[in-house]
């Protein structure tokens, strides 16, 4: 049975606890939230006796299932969590452990009624061709975190901030999404910092996000590309120099710029929807949304010309001894000149 995180929280609070749960997804924040729900099932003073976690990359499935079959010790319930259940996927893991999925099949036929067995699967997809995977999805309570949409993340952020008595402006929220590339775990880390900064006002502004956020290479490149395609030569050169001064490797920076610009071209050329383009390119739809917003006022030929100049610059960095900063200045002069 497929459910969401709120359903599990409500069921646990009401005492409606299933014997087996399957939790699947790649967002670490949501996986951690789910994990904590199951930890909290056991009173803190009983956890040393009635709570256990097993990692299938390091521990044998048999040991976890033996523990699950044990009666609770001076308590009403035992919780056993199995992490990294790669046996449900097609992933090949090189270790000395020889797991037997048939043991899990046997357990599912007769689960211990006083034990809650939780299988954590931090993977985007499971292999439904496997008998154990199919049976688990049918007979367990299945909580799956797929790719979160922008609206999904907005709702989660809104609930989090309202619970703490904060609000956030629309511009600040969009800047936060851009900086984190809509990664929920990173968003929550940034919110921890910015809420401390915003305590007096209780409203998070875009300026506050700018002041507290940890800027990644991807975010810096996003700003740099925006300056390039808008022909802001001096600002682009200053930012490039600053990134090099901060220790960024020229080739790594160049590769990120070229990759980002290639995405802009692909999005500009695409006639599919955001979802369709995202699926075709194998990236999150939010990146497509940002790219479309960036290129909406530019001609494909104009973008292609700049992209080819970027590729030429990358070749020069790789094959000559010329200073990358000088090459970038020459590149920006060409971009500015060709679009005057």
Image: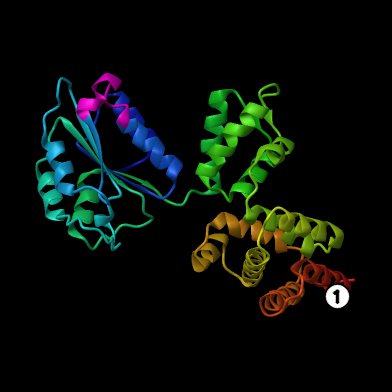
Q: Position of residue 180 (x, y in %)?
A: 59, 47
Quarter of the image that includes the N terminus: top left
Q: Residue at x 83, y 64 (%)?
A: 231
Q: Position of residue 18 (x, y in %)?
A: 22, 35
Q: Residue at x 38, y 49 (%)?
A: 25
Residue sitting nearer the eye, 191 or 278 = 191
Image check: 260 left or right of 183?
right
Secondary structure mostly taken by the magenta-highlighted segment of the chain? helix
Residue sitting nearer the eye, 43 or 184 = 43
Q: Is residue 46 magenta?
A: yes
Q: Which residues are magenta?
A: 39-50
Q: Secondary structure at mark 1?
A: helix
Residue sitting nearer the eye, 66 or 30 = 66
Q: Position of residue 178 (x, y in %)?
A: 64, 49
Q: Is residue 278 magenta?
A: no
**Residue at the right extreme, as displayed:** 340
Q: Quadrant of residue 78?
A: top left
Is residue 327 among the parts visible in the rendering?
yes
Does residue 27 lie above or below 212 as drawn? below
Quarter of the image that includes the C terminus: bottom right
User: Can you identify the residue that label 1 sits on?
Assistant: 338
């Amino acid at each position: 049975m497929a459910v969401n995180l709120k359903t599990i929280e409500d069921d646990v609070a009401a005492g409606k606890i299933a014997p087996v749960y399957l939790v699947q997804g790649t967002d670490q924040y949501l996986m951690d939230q789910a994990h904590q729900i199951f930890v909290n099932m056991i009173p803190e003073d009983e956890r040393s006796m009635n709570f256990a976690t097993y990692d299938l990359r390091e521990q044998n499935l048999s040991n976890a299932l033996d523990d699950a079959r044990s009666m609770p010790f001076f308590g009403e319930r035992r919780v056993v969590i199995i992490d990294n259940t790669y046996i449900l996927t097609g992933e090949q893991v090189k270790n000395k452990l020889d797991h037997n999925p048939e043991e899990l099949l046997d357990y599912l036929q007769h689960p211990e009624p006083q034990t809650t067995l939780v299988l954590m699967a931090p993977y985007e997809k499971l292999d439904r061709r496997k008998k154990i995977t199919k049976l688990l999805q049918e007979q367990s309570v299945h909580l799956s975190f797929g790719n979160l949409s922008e609206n999904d993340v907005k709702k989660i952020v809104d609930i989090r901030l309202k619970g703490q008595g904060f609000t956030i402006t629309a511009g600040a929220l969009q800047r936060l999404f851009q900086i984190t590339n809509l990664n929920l775990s990173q968003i929550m880390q940034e919110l921890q910092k910015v809420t401390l900064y915003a305590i007096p006002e209780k409203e998070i502004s875009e300026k506050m996000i700018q002041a507290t956020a940890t800027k990644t290479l991807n975010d810096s490149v996003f700003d740099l590309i925006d300056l390039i395609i808008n022909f802001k030569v001096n600002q682009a050169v200053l930012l490039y120099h600053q990134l090099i001064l901060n220790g960024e490797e020229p080739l790594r920076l160049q590769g990120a710029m070229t990759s980002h610009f290639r995405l802009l071209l692909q999005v500009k050329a695409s006639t599919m929807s955001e979802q369709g383009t995202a699926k075709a390119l194998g990236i999150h739809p939010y990146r497509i949304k940002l790219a479309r917003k960036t290129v909406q006022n530019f001609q494909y030929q104009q973008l292609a010309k700049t992209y080819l100049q970027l590729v030429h610059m990358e070749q020069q960095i790789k094959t000559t001894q010329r200073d990358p900063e000088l090459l970038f200045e020459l590149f920006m002069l060409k971009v500015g000149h060709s679009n005057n």
